[in-house]
Amino acid sequence: MAPPKKYSNALRTQAIQRYRQSDPKPTFRSLAAELGVHHEALRLWIRNAERAESPTCDGPFDAISKENRRLRKRVADLERVIAIMRGTGSLMTAEYLRRSY
């Protein structure tokens, strides 16, 4: 069960609107002090509101991040293979030396 919310939705909405309507933009600390909320809570509310309203697109950044994830996975797989090959290589060398002498 989720804990009860410390701040009401009305206060969150008011804080976001007040931040957006301000020109120049106030610091999170000063606006939070005026509203009686924690500055990090205010920052998160504003950031989440901006994310929710921004259009999600499969632009070049999304393509690059997908490619980076794929390449990181490939590198991790290859590093595992190299570690296995190093381990068996030393075993093969030790076996070869025992048979040679």
Image (cartoon, rainbow, N blue to C red):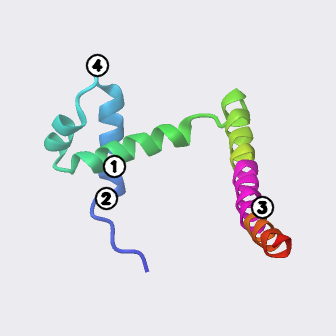
Residue 80 picture location, percent across and down:
72, 60
Q: Are marks 2 and 3 in contact (CB under 8 Å)?
A: no
Number of residues whose C-alpha sits closer than 10 Å to that of mark 3, classed few (under 14), some (14–19) or many (20 or more): few
State whether residue 101 is above or below residue 71.
below
Which-is-in-front pick, marks 3 and 1? 3
Which-is-in-front pick, marks 4 and 3? 3
Residue at 28% from the left image edge and 48% from the top image edge? 40
Residue at the disc numbered 4: 23
Residue 63, by quadrant, is top right
Residue at the disc numbered 3: 85
Which-is-in-front pick, marks 2 and 3? 3
Q: What span is in magenta? A: 73-88
Residue at 20% from the left image edge and 37% from the top image edge? 31
> Three-letter amino acid code at disc 3?
Met
Label 4 secondary element = loop
Q: Are marks 2 and 1 in contact (CB under 8 Å)?
A: yes
Q: Could you tell which of marks 4 and 3 lies nearer the N-terminus?
A: 4
Q: Which mark is residue 8?
A: 2
Q: Could you tell which of marks 3 and 1 lies nearer the N-terminus?
A: 1
Number of residues whose C-alpha sits closer than 10 Å to that of mark 1, classed few (under 14), some (14–19) or many (20 or more): some
> Marks 1 and 4, how far apart in space?
19 Å
Label 3 secondary element = helix
> Three-letter amino acid code at disc 4?
Asp
Q: Could you tell which of marks 2 and 4 lies nearer the N-terminus?
A: 2
> Marks 2 and 4, how far apart in space?
25 Å
